[in-house]
């Protein structure tokens, strides 16, 4: 069976460090070896699990590759695809997929597993919310230990927000740079075709099946931003 491997980590920093990716690759390598699968393609996203699969660039590419090659999508663990049971159900209608950590599971079993996992997350979220409410109530009643815990939690969340914002900005910049680099040769090809205005460049890119990093059609403004990011003298 031919398979397309799909890996996902939550942040660009994790992707650069290899944190989590090596484990995912090893899970899929072992499953492929044990089940006689042939890896014919690999795709990797640096996106949060809260981002739906159809909004992840490399996940969309992996699904398209599966359809084009008649291959099966394989992930190390089910949550690498999604933590949302509705997403999992939708993907089941689009493509066959397997999970390396439970390769014998069929679609019905995977659907049940996803539903149970989602329910457990809801239970955990509810218990956490109730525990925090009780902690805040004790703090407001004058419990010094509870007040200290609330203060530490607030400081930790503030620090995490600052770090998360910085990481998100860096990740977005890295993704934009990677996309721009992939378009450099196309820009040069357009210039070779004697394209001389930004609108003409946008029209050329659209006519040749290219889209912006967000999957939209090019406009003169989008073409200008791309050229500026690449540092190409145009026209």
Image (cartoon, rainbow, N blue to C red):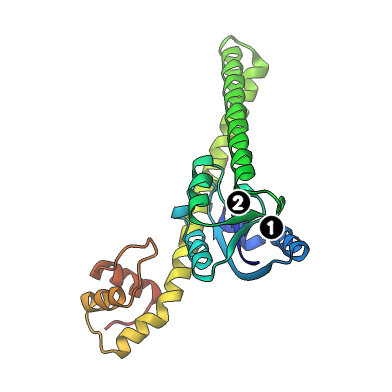
- Secondary structure at badge 1 equals helix
Q: Circle 2 is placed at which residue position?
A: 80
Residue at point 70%, 54% (across, down): 103
Rendered-image quadrant of the C terminus: bottom left
Q: Nearer the viewer, residue 35 or 119?
A: 35
**Residue 145 pos. (x, y %):** 68, 18
Residue at point 62%, 59% (across, down): 74
Whether residue 230 sits left or right of residue 178 in the image: it is left
Tag shown at residue 39: none
Rendered-image quadrant of the N terminus: bottom right
Total marks in image: 2
Q: Is residue 170 visible?
A: no
Vertical order, 151 against 164 (above or below) = above
Q: Which of 232 and 209 is in front in this view?
A: 209
Q: Circle 1 is placed at which residue position?
A: 24
**Residue 207 pos. (x, y %):** 28, 76
- Secondary structure at badge 2 equals helix
Instruction: Give the distance between the C-alpha atoms of the residues marked 1 and 2, in whole angstroms.
Output: 9 Å
Q: In the rendered structure, are the residues bearing label 1 and label 2 in contact, judged by CB atoms less than 8 Å apart?
A: yes
**Residue 222 pos. (x, y %):** 29, 67
For residue 136, which quarter of the picture? Answer: top right
Residue at point 62%, 37% (across, down): 117
Q: Residue furthest top?
A: 141
């Amino acid at each position: 069976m031919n398979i397309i491997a799909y890996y996902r980590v939550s942040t660009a920093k994790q992707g650069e460090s290899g944190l989590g990716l090596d484990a995912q690759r090893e899970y899929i390598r072992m499953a492929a070896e044990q089940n006689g699968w042939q890896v014919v393609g690999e795709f990797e996203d640096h996106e949060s699990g809260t981002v739906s699969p159809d909004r992840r660039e490399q996940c969309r590419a992996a699904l398209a590759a599966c359809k084009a090659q008649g291959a099966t999508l394989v992930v190390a663990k089910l949550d690498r695809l999604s933590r949302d049971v509705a997403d999992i159900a939708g993907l089941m209608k689009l493509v066959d997929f397997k999970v390396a950590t439970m390769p014998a599971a069929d679609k019905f079993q995977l659907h049940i597993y996803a539903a149970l996992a989602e329910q457990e997350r809801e239970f955990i979220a509810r218990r956490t919310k109730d525990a925090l409410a009780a902690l805040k109530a004790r703090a407001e009643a004058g419990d010094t230990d509870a007040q200290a815990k609330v203060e530490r939690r607030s400081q930790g969340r503030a620090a995490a927000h600052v770090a998360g914002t910085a990481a998100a900005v860096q990740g977005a910049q890295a993704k934009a740079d990677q996309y721009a680099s992939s378009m450099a040769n196309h820009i040069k090809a357009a210039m070779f075709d004697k394209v001389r205005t930004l609108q003409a460049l946008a029209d050329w890119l659209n006519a040749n099946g290219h889209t912006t990093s967000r999957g939209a059609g090019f406009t003169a403004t989008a073409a200008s931003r791309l050229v500026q990011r690449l540092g190409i003298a145009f026209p």
